[in-house]
Image: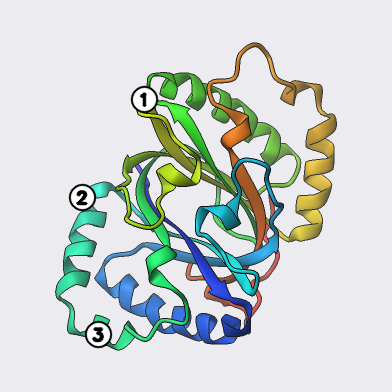
Amino acid sequence: MTYFEGFIVPVPEANKGAYTQHADKFAPLVQDLGVQRMVEAWESDVPEGKVTDFRKAVDAKPDEKIVFSWFEYPDRTTRDATNAKMMSDERMADMSDMPFDGKRMIMGGFESIVDEGQSGGRYTDGWVVPVPTAKRDAYRELAARNAKYFREYGATRLVEAFGDDVTKGKVTDFYRAVQAKDDESVVFAFIEWPDKQTRDQGWEKIMKDERMQPQGDMPFDGKRMFWGGFDKILDTSSQQTSQQPAAPATA
């Protein structure tokens, strides 16, 4: 079962070029150590929320943008082994000069519960949602049903991953980001689209589709869920960077 390490990072807008260069340099290193795929996506359409949002999640400053990022692994065992290698690899010392505030970056390990479609495309929707741990199966069933509709309207891939190794941080973390309760877990999820136009058109159709309307009680608190749209600046599955756009993917 695919395993994900998810990240939300505040990056000064003026450092976008430096961040992209840092990611380009970091990608081959982590792949050599065991990361199957690395994706970095830059803020494009990130709304402000009344209760939670991406900016609040990392205490973003006015001059900062949000990066939504993830590593993919075939399973948690591979992820744990990779992290152990990172801790001892001398090459990691060369990556210490980071163009962002690592103290406010949040990260965690997530186990895939829904994975529909194939990787690809230039645009990503990402969201984070608190889900009662006891309602994991109900959430998975709802997410699996909705994934098929997103694919119908042009999405390349949809992933929902349940919190498996999410630690609490001193400054920020995924639990604080969604104001999670003691009996709740955190879901890290994303949709990949060929491009923003397909995404915008897809969402317009989704919002009008009666099949997507809520049916009964939802197995999560939507008021504490937050989401946003992001342009990919690096995707190792297609060798995509901001300087080398990927070819449009088919749904």
Q: Secondary structure at mark 3?
A: helix
Instruction: Identify which amino acid the numbered label 3 is placed on.
Output: Ala
Residue count near mark 1 (Cα–Cα under 10 Å), binned few <14, some 14–19, many ≥20: few
- Measured as percent of width and height from the top left, residue 118 is found at 55, 50
Q: Secondary structure at mark 1?
A: loop
- Mark closer to the chain start, 2 or 3: 2
Give me the residue at 18% from left, 59% from top: 81
Q: Which residue is mark 1?
A: 183
The answer to whether one can see residue 7 in this image is yes
Q: Which residue is mark 3?
A: 93
The nearer-to-camera label among 2 and 3 is 3
Instruction: Identify which amino acid the numbered label 1 is placed on.
Output: Asp
The nearer-to-camera label among 3 and 1 is 1
- Measured as percent of width and height from the top left, residue 228 is found at 66, 52
Near-viewer residue (152 or 226)? 226
Give me the residue at 29% from left, 88% from top: 94
- Estimate the spatial distance between the alpha carbons at disc 1 and disc 2, rounded to whole Å: 26 Å
In this rendering, position of residue 9 left or right of residue 33: right
Residue count near mark 2 (Cα–Cα under 10 Å), binned few <14, some 14–19, many ≥20: few
Give me the residue at 55% from left, 29% from top: 144
Instruction: Identify which amino acid the numbered label 2 is placed on.
Output: Thr
- Measured as percent of width and height from the top left, residue 189 is found at 52, 44
Mark 2–mark 3 CB contact (< 8 Å): no
- Mark closer to the chain start, 1 or 2: 2
Give me the residue at 16% from left, 64% from top: 84
**As displayed, is residue 24 above or below residue 175?**
below
Q: Which residue is mark 2?
A: 77
Q: Which label is found at residue 86? A: none
- Measured as percent of width and height from the top left, residue 98 is found at 41, 81
- Estimate the spatial distance between the alpha carbons at disc 2 and disc 3, rounded to whole Å: 24 Å
